Image (tube, coloured by chain):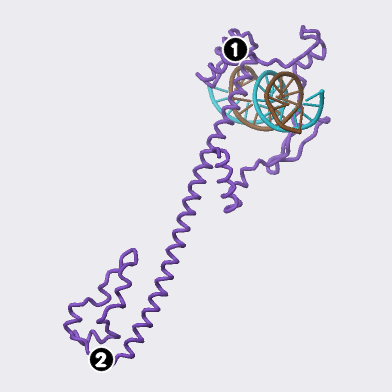
Chain colours: A purple, B cyan, C brown
Amino acid sequence: MNNQNVNDNNLLLISRMYPNVYASSVPQQGLPILFDGLVLGLAVDSKPVRPRRRRKSKNVEMAQEGGDGSNGWFRKRKLSDEQVRMLEMSFGLEHKLESERKNRLASELGLDPRQVAVWFQNRRARWKNKRLEDEYTKLKNEHENVVVQKCHLDSEVLHLKEQLYDAEIEIQRLAQRVEGALSNSPISSSISVEANLTTPFFGDYQIGDDGEGYENLFYSPEYIDGLEWMSQLM
DNA sequence: TTGTGTTTTACGACCTCC
DNA sequence: GGAGGTCGTAAAACACAA
């Protein structure tokens, strides 16, 4: 299973446990705004969108008029690999483009300065998208880890509650047992003071964090009912 | 071959800064 | 006010499955 699948599975698991978590990350599609038969934009609930009037580009006009010097045939020009490589290098050094640098690059690559500017604009947009994507992935992973941690803690709490419940049942059971034993024993009151002094009163028993000590509490053979122990000490 | 989705180039509208 | 930025989008170019 690759990382993508692992991520998808985690996402599925979390989305089942917390159905609202990723709901806000789904892009909201608005209604298309039409102008002169063209889709000009999408209306989003919160913000009114003004229709953008689109002017014919110079290149398209040239193509329609047959004035681009190539038999009226216009094709959007894709930059060569070498041009893109040089532009990428330049972008790697600095994302912003001062006009001097723009003109120098344009003349070096045989491009219009406007093309260089547009390329940088688009490259910045791609870079920003990539960065946002990376940040989103990082935050998503962190969130998934926290959710998994929470699941573990929840199950630990559940386990401890079960243990506590069992212990309480056991206490009740033993208490009934001791009570029964005392009521059946005629010599229950003949316990020596000495024995009581050397044997810790049950309040002195230390019950550890793990619950150890409980079992000794009611098994003490010198267990004294009520406040009888006090009169023996006085 | 063709339909469809993605990437790339280009532009208009709008914003910010000097 | 102009230069250069972002944002949203159109449309060409490209990739690829059916």
Q: Is residue A32 left or right of residue A134?
A: right
Which chain is home to disc 2?
A
Name the residue at 51% across, 38% down: A138
At 27% from the left edge and 85% from the top edge, which residue is drawn? A227
Q: Amino acid at mark 2?
A: Ile
Residue A138 lies left or right of residue A106; in this view the side is left
C-alpha distance separating marks 2 and 1: 106 Å
Q: Quadrant of the C terminus of chain A?
A: bottom left
Badge 2 or badge 1: first in the primary sequence = 1
- x and y, in percent, of residue A212 in the image: 32, 67
As displayed, is residue A13 above or below residue A169? above
Instruction: Tell me if label 2 and label 1 are in contact, CB under 8 Å.
Output: no
Q: Does residue C14 appear to the left or right of A221 in the view shown?
A: right
What residue is drawn where x is 76% and y is 37%? A32
Give residue B6's position: percent from left, percent from top: 66, 29
- The one nearer the camera, A33 or A119, is A119
Percent position of residue A93, x then y = 50, 18
Residue A174 in the image: state x and y as whole percent: 36, 79
Please tell me which residue lies in front, A122 or A17.
Answer: A17
| Residue depicted at 34% across the width and 64% down the height | A210
The image quadrant that residue A5 belongs to is: top right
Q: Quadrant of the N terminus of chain A?
A: top right
Specify the farthest residue to the left: A194
- Residue A82 is labelled as 1
| Residues indicated by labels 2 and 1 sit on the same polypeptide chain | yes
User: Which residue does the numbered mark 2 point to in the structure image?
Assistant: A187
* Mark 1 residue type: Glu
Residue A193 higher or lower than C8, as above or below:
below
Pointer 1 indicates a residue of which chain? A
